[in-house]
Image: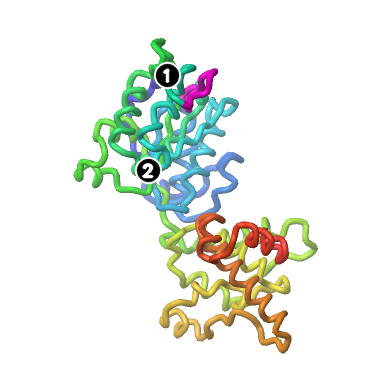
Amino acid sequence: MTGNDNQKTDGVTPKVGNPQSVEEAFRTEKLGVAFDELIGANIAFRKALVTAQRAAKSDISVLIIGESGTGKEILARAIHQTSGRRDQPLVDVNCAAIPDSLIESELFGYEKGAFTGARTEGRKGYFDEAHEGTILLDEIGDSSLSVQAKLLRVLESGIFKRVGGTKNIKVNVRIISSTNQDLAGLIELKKFRDDLFFRLNAFTIQLPPLRERREDIGLLIDYFLKRNGGGEKYKYRFLPDVLKVLYAYHWPGNVRELKGVVSYAVNMTQSPVIDPGSLPNFLFVGKSYQDRLAVPAVEAVQTSRNLTEAVKALERKLIGEVLATAPNKSEAIKILGISRRTFYLKLKEYGLG
């Protein structure tokens, strides 16, 4: 769909003489403001950011690979904002969320009267909206083979027809895709098209999981604490015992999970100094963690002789803990087993919104 689609690379390597010089180049190269939300000094992470910044200068297709919560969407946005298309739209398409029956109308739009229930004036699709900008095919590895076939057709030609239409529409879009799946493995299982894979991975960027860059946990904590502190007169600080817990945890939800834990701790603490009692209980699951850290399991609330106060404290802590771990508020409501109205009333009452 762009002039450079046939290029192939797995990253940009600085033209320097030895591995130490290469590493130093990745550590020291200045990143633009679009990358300010991507915090870390780990060399593999820095390489991913520097590679992304360089890739942004062309229209080449980019495939971002990484586990959920590693920052794929943020990186895609940074690439778009650094590119020559920054003043044009970035359209995010969740490939896994679009039913096969709606894929054509969602991607390509439809003409008036195209099908029962269609808007009388018709509707533009995602590719229309992204014209001269960037389209992010988010979690492309979760798309069905039917969706993949329809995507490939427009990626190869840049031309499509709206549902119910006869006119060819040509678009100029830059393609960024992301996945937490092993696409090569899916190809072997016949669950992903190899021709689409070769079209998408002209330029591949791998984001490492948080457990492989533990040296960045402190930097991320500081960043999230500053954001949570906002305009408050004090700056939050984690006690050493808290940091030990956070460094010991395996972070299956990666940076997104760490952000939720920091937010939870800030909401639970009664002072700017955050102790282990302000952390969610799931961090303490597993005897090995508690033995290693020599700290007891976190109690839900401090003892109180007033039953009403104790119940409220427990309720606040439980809701906050679920919010920190649930993927969204709808799921949190299901876990808590309360009505949506009660849930939002509790959020307001306890200042957890």
Query: Under tag 1, what secondary structure?
Result: loop
User: Could you tell which of marks 1 and 2 lies nearer the N-terminus?
Assistant: 2
**19 falls in the magenta region:** no
Image quarter of the N terminus:
top left
Which quarter of the rendered picture does the C terminus lie within? Answer: bottom right
Extreme residue toward the front, this view: 116
Give percent across and percent down for residue 175. Answer: 42, 30
Q: Mark 2: few, some, or many residues within 10 Å (few <14, many ≥20)?
A: few
- The correct choice, above or below, for 224 with respect to 154 in the image is below
Q: Hey, which residue is sitting farthest bottom in the picture?
A: 305
253 to the left or right of 238? left
- Residue 95 lies in quadrant: top left
In the rendered image, is residue 16 in sight?
no
Tag 2: amino acid: Gly
In the image, what residue occupies the spot 50% across and 86% down?
A: 294
Residue 52 or residue 352, whichever sits in front: 352
Q: Which residue is drawn at 40% across and 28% down?
A: 60
Q: Is residue 291 above or below residue 106?
A: below
Query: Which numbered dot is residue 162?
Result: 1
Circle 2: element type:
loop
- Residue 122: in magenta span: yes
Which residue is depicted at the point 46% across and 23% down?
109
The magenta span reads 117-128
Tell me if residue 205 comes above or below residue 4 in the rendering: below
Residue type at mark 1 is Arg
Which is more foreground, mark 1 or mark 2?
A: 1
| Residue that label 2 marks | 17
Question: In the image, residue 190 lies at what x, y percent?
Answer: 20, 41
Whether residue 71 sits left or right of residue 308 in the image: it is left
Q: Position of residue 197 (x, y in %)?
A: 29, 35
Q: Which residue corresponds to the image point at 40% horizontal and 35% vertical from the top-left?
A: 62
